Amino acid sequence: MGKELLLEIGTEEIPAAFLPTAEKDMAEIIRREFAALRIRHGEVKTMAAPRRLCLCVEEVAEKQDDQVVEKLGPAVRVAFDEQGQPTKAALGFAKGQGLVFSELQRVTTDKGEYLLVRKEIIGEETKNLLPDMLVRFIPSIPFKKSMRWSHFELRFARPIHWIVALFGGETVDFQIENIRSGNRTFGHRFMSPKFAAVRDFKDYLAVTRENFVIVDPGERKRIIREETAKAAAAVSGQALENDGLLQEVTYLTEYPSVVCGSYDENYLRLPKEVLVTSMMSHQKYFPVIDAAGKLLPFFLTVNNTLPRDPAVVARGNEKVIRARLADAKFFFEEDRKISLDRRVEDLKKVVFHTLLGTSYEKVMRFRALATAIADEIRPALKETVDRTAVLAKADLDTQMVCEFTELQGIMGREYALLAGENPVVAAAICEHYLPIAAGGALPETDEGAIVSIADKLDTIVGFFGVNLIPTGTADPYALRRQALGIINIILHKKYPLTLTEWIDKSLDILDGKLRRPAAEVRADVLEFFRARFENLLISQGHPYDVVDAVLAAGAAHLVDAVQKIEAMEAFKSHEDFQPLAIAFKRVGNILKDFRGGAVDPALFEAEAEKALYEACRAIGEIAVRQIAGGDYAQALIQLARLRKPVDAFFDAVLVMAKDEKVKLNRLSLLKEISDLFHRIADFSKIVTEV
């Protein structure tokens, strides 16, 4: 039976956003450390609070597993001389392993007989290994940002003030910089600022609780949920749920308590999003709503202490939110004094990017692109799409959005409604920013979707055009997210858009801004989209080889590509699939760098050539018609009929004939068949059984 390892790293307040990731990383790193040291263990628990990171590993073995190490030496034929005496190579190998020659063994391998050393390494006691391991472990915990302090070399999220390290109740003694490990934890900074000794994990949880620290974030989250529900119910409401805010306040507190405050009902005349943003994003308050989801003039604040007088805490927070909402009301009223069309003109003074012009220029670019897209796929909506594009960025210069950047688009919608704009246009102004994050909501209106595609495409092509391309993990303009947004919108709406056409259109509109040849930009942007599209499809569970095969045949039409992939997945169960794929790998190798030419039936020498040619023409005519109609599943079944004539061709004909004309004619026939299949996928990319 193993022993328990307890580690607590006590620090100054670590940013809340760092802690959930730190919990996961600690568990992963400690498992790797134990595995490398051959130390068995049980469950790994990690917990975090603003001033501490905690790790508990159960059932840790008291010693390493024993290990048998084998190492091959020289071959026997070079280990002995003609007299059967060990050579220098053999003696040197034995000496290098700390053995005498007689302790070496012989072993027979596939390559012959070799000398072998076999050592049994007895596992060391865990308690002797833990100090060095923990000295490695603590600095290895990664953070988005780390810091150094005083004159020390150690980098960590925040300065370390104490370390608890216990193995089976006994202190694991080590030192990191000026901090020596021990058995004493520290209580709440304000409610119990003192050290307290602990014996094990169970005792640690009890002692920290007695000193007003709840280490388990799951318990803190439960307390916050229960307390906010109770406080909201006291004013006949309920807390507006937000998982992001709940997680943030969970990791901002060590001993959470909830206080309810109120604000003037007159502020409820402001748009709901303004109030919610002011409370949630800026003050970390939970708004209170009624059963219908309407805001009530109350808010809930989560404190990191037990207030002596909740009313005093409430009044302090009310004073803060009152000032916030008064500013918001002022901004809202001032913004309404200027028309949206005037604000569009004012965008001429706002620089979008020094290389790509003003925000007004950008609006005019994606306006032209959006109306062209609408003209092709939704001509009846061209007018509303145009108006949406014109007003899409009108709120960027408003005081409200300058103060609350999270409200861009939302305020555009609200101001458009108040100005009497078409409600569809107002909704689309807000939607054109979607999706805001990976997997986020997509535009519901066609106007919002089309303008979103146009805006994002102009951004991507523009930045590629001035050579500001994402590299590695660096993507300052979020171009990857915007490309995925375009892909998801097109797939969601099933728009029959071809990327190449609209990238070219965007390049034409950007003419004069480009700093690279348009052909280069076009190729790079297409590859950029292809990579995002491929990753998305594979993440959705589509087989990578099928995805690769279809995209290799062309991925400009996204909706068609998905339909082809789905048809190929279904076709995989067809009895002719594997033989066809194998045959086309062979065809691909034969046709490498061959561009093809016209097939001349008069040059056929074998009946198999003629039969394949006639089958290709007859079957191809049907398949092409089915492909044109988008019926890829039936087209593949039709093309599968070529398997037998293809097999017969290879059995009866030498493609690389001595006669150059005959050879080129046979290659052209194969190219014609390959091109037929290539309308759906490049079968040579399929992973086959042989």
Image (cartoon, grey):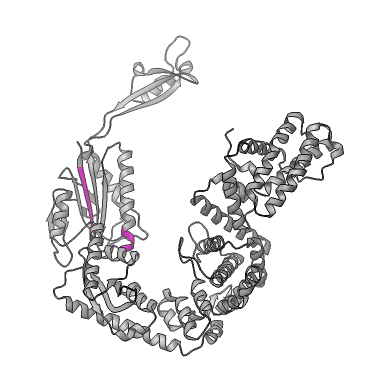
Q: Is residue 676 visible?
A: yes
Q: Quadrant of residue 668?
A: top right
Residue 652 image position (x, y, % from top left): 76, 29
In the displayed structure, does residue 273 sit left or right of residue 210? Answer: right
Q: Residue at x 40, y 21 (%)?
A: 116
Q: Is residue 543 above or below residue 190?
A: above
Along the line of sight, which residue is nearer the eye, 154 or 353? 353
| Magenta span of residues | 4-19
Residue occupying the point 57% across, 67% down: 453
Q: Quadrant of residue 367?
A: bottom right
Q: Nearer the viewer, residue 572 or 45?
A: 572
How many numbered discs? 0
- Is 444 in the magenta? no
Q: Residue furthest bottom?
A: 337
Q: Residue at x 64, y 41 (%)?
A: 684
Against 56, is 254 above or below? below
- Residue at far right of view: 602
Percent position of residue 29, x then y: 33, 47
**Side (left or right) of 70 relative to 126:** right
Residue 516 visible here: no
Q: Position of residue 298 (x, y in %)?
A: 27, 78
The quadrant holding residue 266 is bottom left
The quadrant in which the N terminus is found is top left
